[in-house]
Image (spheres, rainbow, N blue to C red):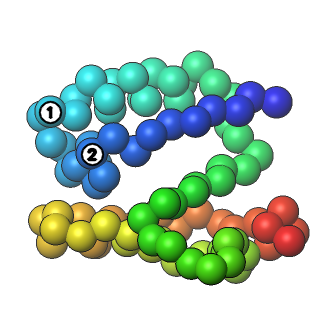
Amino acid sequence: PDILYISHGGGPLPLLGDPAHNELVIQLTSLGKRLRRPSAIIVVSAHWEAPVAAVTSGAQPPLIYDYSGFPPESYEIQYPAPGAPGLAT
């Protein structure tokens, strides 16, 4: 299987059309055209600490805005991807 690690770069800024992130958007768009559709995507966040690791396992997990200080529209971004409760288990 193909496994990729992709850093998010400037948080939500690439999604907001920030000119400083144009090259990142171009590269990720190109990558998306070359790879086959993934069977799963795992998103890992290190933006908070907890005594125990947690996994979001819902069938329709919400998007977690684990950042702050960005323009208001960055908190309106949606990614209604289906969850994979079986895989999360």
Front-most of residues 72 and 34: 72
Residue behind mark 2: 10
Front-most of residues 9 and 77: 9
Q: Secondary structure at mark 2?
A: loop
Q: Residue at x 31, y 67 (%)?
A: 67
Distance from Cα at disc 1 to Cα at disc 2? 9 Å
Q: Earlier in the sequence, mark 1 or mark 2?
A: 2
Q: Crowdedness of circle 2 by 10 Å Cα count: few (<14), some, many (20+)?
A: few
Q: What amino acid is found at the position of numbered circle 1 in the picture? A: Ala
Instruction: State the image coordinates of residue 73 (x, y, percent, origin top left).
Output: 18, 67
Residue behind mark 1: 20
Q: Is residue 14 left or right of residue 6?
A: left
Q: Crowdedness of circle 1 by 10 Å Cα count: few (<14), some, many (20+)?
A: few
Q: Residue at x 80, y 72 (%)?
A: 85
Q: Quadrant of residue 65?
A: bottom left
The reply to whether residue 24 is in sight is yes
Q: What amino acid is found at the position of numbered circle 2 in the picture? A: Gly
Answer above or below: position of 47 versus 20: below
Q: Quadrant of the C terminus?
A: bottom right
Instruction: State the image coordinates of residue 25 (x, y, percent, origin top left).
Output: 32, 32
Q: Residue at x 50, y 73 (%)?
A: 49
Q: Quadrant of residue 12?
A: bottom left
